[in-house]
């Protein structure tokens, strides 16, 4: 069972971390909302961080898929030349709802456009890995040909034990639904902390998990 960490800078083996420099200084709750936080040029910060990084072999990174100011083809090729092999859509629009969701969709910012962006990177040798929040988003990603999914449990907030268990059970239902669509999918569960990961494991301690692993915000050390 593999555990990946979402980090703003890499200290260890790149293949065990998803690098996303725009998240520097943000906690896990703020990270969920990073797409609407004016914190800088996410993709340019990523390229700068990669250029100064010593160990870049098989690096995993998170990119802002809704960046209108960057040429996709040259961006993908530059990522590949810097050692990147896997890309994810983060910060992401998967949480947007109601009127704000509609407004952002009108300017092309929505999950499906992110999945399309990710799949275009395969031409440069990059493997797409999609953050998703719902069954519909997962189906959209799968229809685009994406084989790696990271299921996000929702915005980081305080929940009662009953509500928390309901969230965990809904994750299980999504996992089963996706594997029914394609048994060869690699599925990861995103957790805001190691504590959340342990709660998930405890909830299903007697059940063999069909997932490939977890993505945890920040370091697990």
Image (cartoon, rainbow, N blue to C red):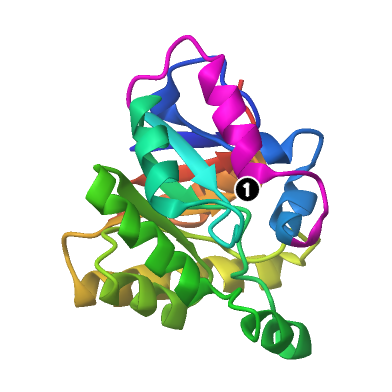
Kindly tell me whether residue 206 is visible in this rendering: no
> Residue 158, relative to residue 163: is it above or below?
above
In terms of image quadrants, where is residue 218? top right
Image: magenta residue range: 36-58
Q: Secondary structure at mark 1?
A: helix
Question: Looking at this view, is 128 or 108 the one in front?
Answer: 108
Q: Quadrant of the N terminus?
A: top left
> Residue 59, relative to residue 39: is it above or below?
above
Q: Residue at x 77, y 67 (%)?
A: 160
Q: Residue at x 72, y 50 (%)?
A: 31
Q: Position of residue 138 (x, y in %)?
A: 39, 73
Q: Quadrant of the C terminus?
A: top right
Q: Is residue 40 magenta?
A: yes
Q: Position of residue 37 (x, y in %)?
A: 81, 55
Q: Residue at x 64, y 66 (%)?
A: 154
Q: Position of residue 187 (x, y in %)?
A: 34, 56
Q: Residue at x 52, y 44 (%)?
A: 62
- Judging by the rendered image, the residue that carries numbered circle 1 is 196
Taking the image as shown, residue 86 lies to the left or right of residue 198, namely left
Q: Is residue 81 magenta?
A: no
């Amino acid at each position: 069972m593999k555990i990946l960490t979402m980090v703003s800078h890499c200290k260890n083996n790149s293949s065990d971390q998803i690098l996303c420099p725009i998240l520097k200084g943000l906690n896990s709750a703020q990270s969920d909302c990073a797409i609407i936080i004016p914190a800088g040029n996410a993709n340019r910060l990523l390229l700068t961080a990669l250029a100064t990084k010593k160990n870049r072999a098989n690096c995993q990174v998170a990119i802002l898929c809704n960046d209108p100011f960057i040429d996709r083809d040259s961006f993908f090729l530059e990522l590949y030349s810097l050692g990147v092999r896997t890309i994810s859509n983060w910060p992401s629009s998967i949480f947007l709802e109601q009127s704000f969701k509609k407004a952002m969709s009108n300017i092309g910012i929505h999950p499906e456009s992110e999945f399309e962006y990710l799949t275009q990177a395969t031409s440069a040798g990059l493997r797409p890995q999609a953050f998703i929040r719902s069954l519909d988003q997962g189906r959209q990603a799968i229809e685009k040909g994406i084989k790696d999914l990271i299921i996000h449990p929702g915005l980081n907030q305080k929940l009662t034990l009953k509500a928390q268990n309901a969230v965990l059970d809904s994750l299980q239902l999504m996992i089963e639904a996706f594997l029914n669509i394609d048994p060869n999918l690699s599925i990861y569960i995103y957790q805001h902390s190691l504590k959340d990961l342990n709660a998930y494991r405890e909830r299903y301690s007697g059940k063999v998990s069909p997932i490939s692993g977890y993505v945890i915000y920040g370091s697990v050390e």
